[in-house]
Image (spheres, grey):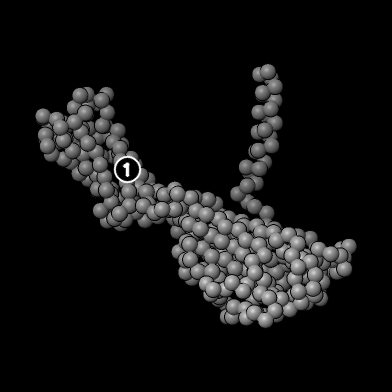
Amino acid sequence: MSTRRSLLASAAAAFIAPMAMAWPRRACANEHWVPGGSGGIQRGQFGYTPTGSNGGYGTIGLPSAGVLYMIPLTVQVFHESAGARYQLRGDGLITVLNDGLYDLTANLDWPAQARGSGQDGFDVNLRAFFVQRIPVGVAPPVYTPGKVTPIPADSQLYDTLAAVYMPGSSVPNAVRTSVQWSPGTIAAGAMATTEVMLPAGSFVPTIGDLVLVSHASLADSVLGAANAGLAISARIVAPRVARVMIENRYAASAVTIPAGTMNLVAESAVSTAGNSVDAWSWLGSGSVELLANERLMVAVCSQSPGDFLQIDASSFLRVTNVVPA
């Protein structure tokens, strides 16, 4: 049995190791295509024009949290029907030219915060991603080149063909640090205090946020029975500044606390926060009936202030006819 387990473990390690090595460098969602299509199936893939850049990547920023925006489709990646089935017409939308059954596939690539900001890999609150249809006779959002377009909240006339919601999780962001501190001798009923500058990290701790603290010398093995009469606490008193207090609250005489390592963990007092790597968000509509002169758009919403999309080969909308020509 032990030999079998060893073989299984070796096989699992051999399978996982290449994945772990490749995971940080994801392949872009490129696809081979054939002019004219194949077997009567023709696909078109369309993308976006960056309005900014960050960390060497093109980006599209979302100006406000909680607002639904149309992300304009402006780039033709490939088009096997050469514009015969659907077209980009400079309005940020795809216009359908022929009635039929179509399959829509979309993906977005969005890191949560600016690279190098100290918040890499953190996202907060809900994100939503939609592929929507604008029926014939319904006015589309007005696209301004170089900008995203807010979509009115009462836009029920737009049909949602595919959607994904990515909720945040109820986990606070945190920063931590360790410092050396020698509290010294604390008289009965007195206290020793110090202030600690917290590092930049996933958020900036400020008044109202939470902080936990420990000190390695507050141990029975170091202080004996006197340790039972001591209390340690901390609070945020200014942005990134934590004040630590050790009180000789209950002992009848002075207590001397030697130097030791003090650990602090500050946590954001927000209701939702996430902790993930850059997010790919895939959508698939399945077969949907589209009519000539209907239009397609991509819309997103994020509850995270300062959120943005990363614009590369992994951000696109692909349209495919289901019934062969």
In this picture, residue 181 sits left or right of residue 45: left
Tell me residue 228's x, y (percent): 21, 28
Residue at horizontal 67 percent and vertical 41 percent from the top: 18
Residue at horizontal 33 percent and vertical 52 percent from the top: 209
Quadrant assignment for the C terminus: bottom right
Q: How many numbered markers are drawn?
A: 1
Q: Work out whether residue 67 can be spotted.
A: yes
Q: Work out whether residue 78 can be spotted.
A: no
- Amino acid type indicated by mark 1: Leu
Which type of secondary structure does the marked residue at label 1 adopt? strand
Tell me residue 100's x, y (percent): 80, 70
Above or below for 157 versus 316:
below
Tell me residue 127's x, y (percent): 53, 60
Please tell me in which quadrant of the rendered image residue 283 appears.
bottom right
Residue at horizontal 65 percent and vertical 33 percent from the top: 13
Tell me residue 144's x, y (percent): 58, 80
Viewer-nearest residue: 79 or 196: 79
In this picture, residue 51 sits left or right of residue 89: left
Quadrant assignment for the N terminus: top right
Task: Farthest residue to the top: give it.
Answer: 1
Please tell me in which quadrant of the rendered image residue 218 appears.
top left
Please tell me in which quadrant of the rendered image residue 265 appears.
top left
Above or below for 284 versus 298:
above
Q: Which residue matches tag 1?
A: 212
> How many residues crowd around disc 1 within 10 Å: few (fewer than 14), some, or many (20 or more)?
some
Above or below for 304 versus 202:
below
Above or below for 214 versus 85:
above
Residue at horizontal 73 percent and vertical 59 percent from the top: 286
